[in-house]
Image (cartoon, grey):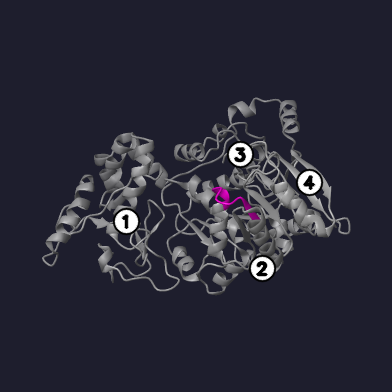
Amino acid sequence: MLSTPSHASNLLFSTAAVAAKFFSPSVTSADATHASSFSNLASSASLSPGPLPASTSLNTSLVSTTDVEDEPIKSYSKHQRWPLQGEPVCVVCGRYGEYICDQTEHDVCSLECKAKDIIQCTGASRSQDPSLTHQSSSLITAEHITVESPLQDIKNISPPVQAAEILQGNNLTYTYVEHEFITQLGQDQVDNLRQQLGLSAQGKDVCRPIIEFEHCNFPPTLCTNLKRAGYDVPTPVQMQMIPVGLMGRDILASADTGSGKTAAFLLPAVVRCMKQKDAPAALILTPTRELAIQIEKQAQELMFKLPQMKTALLVGGMPLPPQLHRLRQNVQVIIATPGRLIEIISQNSVNLGELKILILDEADTMLKMGFQQQVLEILENTPQDRQTVLVSATIPESIESFSSQLLRDPVRITVGEKNQPCSNVRQIVLWVEEPSKKKKLFEILNDSKLFQPPVLVFVDCRLGADLLCEAIHKIMELECVAIHSDKSQSERTKILQGLLQGQYDVVVSTGVLGRGLDLVHVKLVVNFDMPSSMDEYVHQVRMSDMSVEYVVYLPKRSIN
């Protein structure tokens, strides 16, 4: 099957201080010169050579897994050891990434590399917005130095408005209140709006949909993040799902891949996390590593510059020690695959006792892959009064039954028809016998009207993916790569990034890329082998919006 979208959907780092080295007689002149440059950058923090004043201490937002009192934070990268296998690596120098920079969320080895990392990130931010230059100097001390009177210190150093923003961010309270414009709408207008959007919302006392993000009255920083991430106008599923989620209701939602459902559940999750800083407040379970990586990226975009907000990615196929290290950094949002999270729970390395919201994304795929028992085991470690959200492209009977065990008085939200391909996907069936399938595929790839790279070709087995990839590269002389479960996680991540960046003409994949990923840059989708079920077929045809599908179909096989 092929699909050709008529268009591709769209989808700063905060200014920060740098820390200076406090000189001692043993420091060399070269070290002193090096440290002096950092000291100048941190001048607004009132840092100077010499010991720390009794009333001042380094901000522990740069956290180590070791006891700070027993082992001081390393000032220079040369004082840090090289990493062992599986340990985090400093993004600046490659040494052991013992700490996490609170401003960039990157692993760093020392205050020196933290400074360099922040400078690199803020340099890009200032080039986009020159107004950030003044703000960076005014926020340095408030962000990175703790004094006996934090309130007085902030007032003395930062302008009044900025001080208010800092204090509000650290003690943020948010309650969703229906916007006056929405309240004034008549019920017939609300019903007509849902009908025009193809939106169905069933349940007791379902709140009305929003029309603009401004109707949620999010904090200013979150509003800015939405705009920077390209969320200008809410999609239909976001219009209904966001206010319901903000009200704390359980949700069962079905919407197309690419419909914006990830942001629809992330925004309520981020808001819940603002009120809790010392333990994970949100858990997002996904069936695949690739989907988890994609969700974490979107979460970090929305959480950018929100005080003390961190994510942890817990997935198999990646080293466990860095993930355990990350969990010890007071993260608020966990994105995980069930298998890896069960492994970490069995080691008593994560506390889910204060969880506020649990989200199961692509729940139907999760059950199909045999994760139901693992999900139930995870739920036993979470509070009974949590908010639970089940999201999927399809709602088969298995999900209906499963949701009845998990959800309490849920709101059921559906965009479009359940268990049907997207309404904006036109599907064309090509009847091709087995011996002629490869020839037909080559004809399609040689047709200038049909071939619009990058092309995604689905096959049903790993060996078939490798063989077909080799044939395409040899005969068609196209940049082609195969991706399947035998590939290492680093290989799969690299291929996925290359696909999104247009580095490949053709990507041959098993179903690993058919589960919830929104590949907006894909111009053509080919089902070389038909999927084994209707649900799997629906997932694959929802890979991108506004597409035309051509199906390479075998008469002897059928969709169950």
Circle nearer the viewer, 4 or 2: 4
Query: Mark 2 to mark 3: distance in Å?
Result: 35 Å
Residue at 82% over, 48% down: 430
Give the class, few, some or many, for how many residues have Cα within 10 Å of label 2's Cα (few <14, many ≥20).
some
Q: CA separation, marks 1 and 4?
A: 49 Å
Dot 4 and dot 2 residues touching (CB under 8 Å): no
Quadrant showing the C terminus: bottom right
Whichever of labels 2 and 1 marks the residue nearer the N terminus, that label is: 1
Residue 130: horizontal and vertical position, in percent? 33, 34
Labels 1, 3: front one? 3
- The residue that mark 2 highlights is 374
Q: Position of residue 17 (x, y in %)?
A: 29, 49
Tell me the tag on residue 418. 4
Residue hosting label 3: 9
The alpha-carbon separation of the residues under discs 4 and 3 comes to: 23 Å
Q: Earlier in the sequence, mark 2 or mark 3?
A: 3
Residue kind at label 4, given as amino acid type: Lys
Nearest to the eye among marks 2 and 1: give it: 1
- Which amino acid, by three-letter code, is at mark 2? Gln
